[in-house]
């Protein structure tokens, strides 16, 4: 222990005697370790930390597996019908508990300003299944899961605090939801949010933050309905039941239902997904890619420190030779040098923790809100442990080989009076290997960032099919009990007239669902004059309910026919507008204008609509998703209580919010508006995950390039310093500056060429791992590879040229006198 303490004290003195070296080494290393700790904190919180429920590994999502839905929307997990859920619940032996839920939108009135809230209708067993209790009051009772006994509500902590002033007396009070009375029976804990919007597949319209819960309470009609799919189902496996066993049993139940109900279940299976995988699965590839990238940055930083230590070891040869002459064995010298390296690493690790805390705050500010569990990201004990392990590992990684090299001392040569100090061939070869590895790793990161950048540019050049500039959007949900379909249409017609009359408004329309909102639905139809589609080729398109001026407000181009007018009212002939993808798929060589399509009405009687127009495709789901068949209904003929208003303005669209709210409340003072955004915000949000990935990888690649350039500059400068005497001899014997420059540049660029070749080979193999993050760009895109290889070569050439150019200014007389 005393010897260790002596090593630590001596090592600390040596580092303090060389503050420049220590500052550069600690700063470089702390940046690498801090970046790793910050990214690991995200990976830890999102991927590694257990979900905040009782025994979360036993939770699974149970989805309907419908090939037609997947073909139409790309969704592998589909919502479940109430009848299928009831059969699954009653027939399975694998689940301890099973619950269903779906979203609801509600207006709270009678308590100050009306509020629009996002809610969930859930089976009474949901909270017991998750293992959570109410913070105040209670959760649902089993008997409240029946129609007629379900007028109770549980509030989220967020709504309790913001909407009711955290009043503990709210339990037992009655509040008005969509003009209907509900009794508050509980308030959930502050950290409880289920489900989060990011927990479920795209297309499920759960609110980003759930404000309240009401019992599901399925009616007999709903329990027998197999055609309407709207439920999400979660289950808890029994303690002794494995995932595969449960999946096999549920597939057997699905097969029995196919035989029992061929009309509705013939092409319907079941799909189980572990809940942890459901929540974080889609984020995993990008986060692991970022963790790998920042790991490469740390390796480059370690290579730079190793180069510094090699140069420092060469300068300390005489000191180490004296220690050896006085009896210090080689292992003793190695231990001393490793102690100094670990001191450097420990100092860098301490600074890195501070940088990680700051970096996590920065990451939380720029992380897209659709990243699952983003609000849980922070620095915890596991991040501290990770930082400690990485710091010690880095200290050994960059310190071991320089220590081994420095401990090989030729006492006679080193202690000879006036003998030249030299790094030796082994030192130089190892420095060359370090530079090659830095160049290769930097090129790998540059290529990855370049591919993401090119992909992002391609994505942003995609035509969304609409003009998002100066467009305000806001949601309005009319209570069904207060507004029947004719009144719904009248409300929105009157409101749109008022909005169009406001100063600065060019046009105003309404739509459901809004493009890029994440909502996607499907509707089957028949085509006049054609035989009914077979089950395997069922015709489907996404429905949208719009006002006449909707296309004008978003500048969606009309290609054929006409769009809706005010004359397309409830009593007018039923009409339809389709997009070009639908026309291309179902009328490939025909003009669809004047064609008729049929929809199922009451008693399965067909309801025919005439196609009057074809409009340009709109990227409704996301810019990276191909446009699918879409059909537009005039909302006056097909009223909806939920609509999104879109208003195109002359200037800043957000300046219209107060005036729009006042117009809504002039019609109905109890009617709130919600989800106020500009269309440009929604477009930016749809690409936020890709932008985040690109930003971080570009930063890491830039840091890697800087470190690699500093590394090769340092090696070249040290080489020039070592070869000063040789350069002086060459120049004294008649060698020109150009010859010296060519010699040194050749030495440096040879290392660069080898590093670039290795980097290109590594990138060719490893960039395939990020192919899922790319859009319209191959993982082996030759333009990106060649361009970035040339860029790195040019920058490295400059790093070689500066010290080589300095060497040509050496005075031969001075150089010869130095030795």
Image: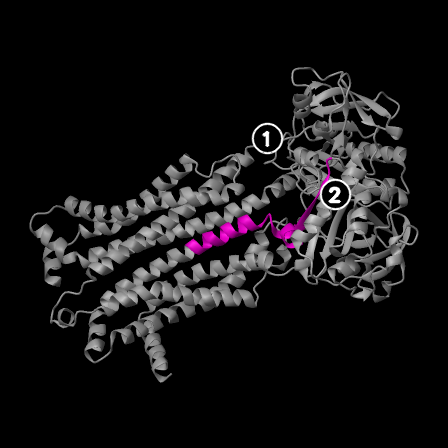
Measured along the vertical axis of the image, is residue 786 above or below residue 193? above
Taking the spot 61% from the left edge, 35% from the top edge, the residue there is 625
Mark 1 or 2, which is nearer the eye?
Answer: 2
Q: Disc 1 designates what residue?
A: 463
Q: Is residue 449 left or right of residue 374?
A: left
Of 427 and 63, nearer the camera is 63
User: Which residue reaches farthest left?
Assistant: 733
Q: Is residue 298 left or right of residue 664?
A: left
Q: Assign a secondary structure to mark 1.
A: loop
Q: Is residue 600 visible?
A: yes
What is the crowding at mark 2: few (fewer than 14 residues within 10 Å), some, or many (at least 20)? Answer: many
The quadrant holding residue 429 is bottom left
- Disc number at residue 50? none
Measured along the vertical axis of the image, is residue 105 above or below residue 32? above
Q: Which residues are magenta?
A: 267-296
Q: Disc 2 designates what residue?
A: 254
């Amino acid at each position: 222990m005393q010897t260790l303490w002596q090593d630590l004290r001596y090592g600390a003195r040596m580092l303090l005697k060389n503050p420049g070296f220590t500052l550069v080494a600690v700063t470089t290393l702390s940046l690498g370790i801090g970046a790793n700790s910050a990214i690991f904190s995200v990976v830890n919180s999102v991927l590694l930390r257990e979900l905040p429920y009782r025994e979360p590994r036993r939770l699974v999502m149970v989805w309907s597996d419908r090939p037609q839905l997947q073909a139409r929307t790309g969704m592998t997990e589909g919502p479940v019908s109430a009848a299928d859920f009831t059969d699954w619940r009653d027939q399975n032996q694998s689940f301890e508990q099973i619950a269903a839920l779906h979203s609801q939108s509600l207006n709270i009135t009678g308590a100050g300003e009306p509020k629009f809230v996002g809610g969930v209708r859930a089976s009474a067993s949901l909270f017991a299944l998750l293992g959570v209790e109410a913070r105040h009051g209670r959760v649902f009772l089993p008997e409240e899961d029946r129609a007629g006994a379900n007028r109770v509500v549980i509030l989220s902590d967020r709504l309790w605090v913001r909407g009711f002033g955290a009043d503990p007396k709210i339990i037992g009070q009655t509040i008005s939801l969509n003009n209907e009375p509900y009794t508050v029976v509980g308030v959930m804990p502050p950290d409880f949010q289920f489900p989060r919007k990011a927990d479920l597949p795209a297309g499920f319209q759960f609110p980003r933050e759930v404000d309240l819960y009401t019992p599901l309470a399925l009616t007999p009609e709903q329990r027998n309905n197999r055609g309407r799919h709207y439920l999400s189902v979660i289950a808890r496996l029994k303690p002794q039941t494995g995932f595969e066993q449960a999946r096999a049993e549920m597939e057997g139940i699905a097969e029995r239902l196919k035989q029992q109900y061929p009309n509705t279940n013939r092409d319907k299976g079941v799909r189980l997904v572990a809940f942890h995988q459901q929540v974080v699965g889609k984020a995993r590839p990008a986060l692991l890619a970022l963790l790998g990238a920042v790991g490469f940055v740390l390796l480059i930083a370690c290579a730079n420190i190793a180069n510094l230590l090699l140069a420092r070891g060469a300068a300390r040869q005489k000191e180490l030779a004296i220690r050896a002459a006085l009896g210090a064995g080689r292992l003793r010298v190695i231990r001393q040098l490793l102690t100094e390296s670990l001191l450097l690493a420990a100092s860098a690790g301490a600074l890195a923790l501070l940088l990680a805390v700051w970096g996590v705050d920065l990451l939380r500010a720029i992380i897209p809100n659709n990243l699952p569990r983003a609000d849980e990201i922070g620095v915890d004990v596991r991040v501290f442990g990770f930082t400690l392990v990485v710091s010690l590992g880095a200290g050994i990684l960059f310190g071991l080989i320089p220590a081994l090299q420095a401990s090989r001392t030729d006492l006679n040569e080193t202690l000879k009076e006036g003998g030249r100090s030299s790094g030796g061939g082994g030192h130089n070869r190892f420095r060359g290997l370090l530079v090659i590895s830095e160049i290769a790793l930097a090129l790998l990161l540059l290529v990855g960032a370049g591919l993401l950048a090119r992909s992002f540019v391609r994505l942003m050049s995609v035509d969304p099919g609409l003009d998002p500039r100066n467009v305000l959007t806001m949601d309005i949900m009319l209570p069904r009990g207060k507004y029947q379909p004719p009144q719904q249409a009248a409300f929105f017609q009157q409101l749109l007239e008022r909005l169009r009359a406001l100063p600065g408004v060019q046009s105003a329309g309404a739509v459901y669902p809004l493009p890029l909102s994440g909502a996607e639905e499907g509707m089957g139809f028949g085509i006049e004059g054609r035989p009914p589609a077979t089950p395997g080729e069922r015709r489907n398109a996404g429905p949208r309910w719009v006002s006449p001026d909707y296309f004008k407000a978003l500048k969606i181009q009309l290609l054929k026919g006409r769009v809706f007018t005010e004359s397309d009212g409830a009593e007018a002939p039923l009409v339809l507008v389709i997009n070009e993808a639908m026309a291309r798929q179902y009328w490939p060589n025909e003009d669809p204008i004047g064609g008729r399509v049929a929809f199922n009405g009451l008693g399965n009687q067909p309801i025919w609509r005439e196609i009057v127009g074809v409009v340009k495709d709109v990227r409704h789901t996301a810019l990276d998703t191909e446009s699918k068949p879409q059909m537009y209904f005039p909302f006056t003929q097909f009223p909806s209580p939920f609509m999104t208003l879109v208003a195109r303005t002359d200037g800043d669209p957000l300046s219209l919010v107060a005036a729009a709210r006042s117009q809504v409340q002039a019609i109905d003072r109890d009617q709130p508006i919600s989800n106020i955004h500009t269309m440009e915000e929604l477009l930016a949000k749809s690409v936020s995950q890709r932008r985040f990935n690109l930003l971080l990888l570009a930063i890491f690649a830039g840091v890697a390039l800087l470190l690699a350039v500093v590394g090769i500059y340092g090696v070249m400068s040290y080489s020039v310093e070592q070869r000063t005497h040789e350069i002086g001899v060459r120049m004294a014997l008649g060698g020109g500056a150009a010859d010296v420059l060519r010699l040194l540049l050749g030495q440096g660029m040879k290392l660069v060429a080898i590093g670039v070749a290795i980097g290109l080979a590594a990138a060719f193999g490893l960039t395939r791992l990020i192919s899922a993050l790319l859009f319209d760009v191959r993982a082996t895109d030759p333009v990106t590879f060649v361009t970035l290889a040339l860029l790195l070569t040019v920058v490295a050439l400059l790093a070689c040229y500066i010290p080589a150019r300095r060497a040509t200014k050496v005075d031969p007389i001075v150089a010869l006198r130095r030795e």
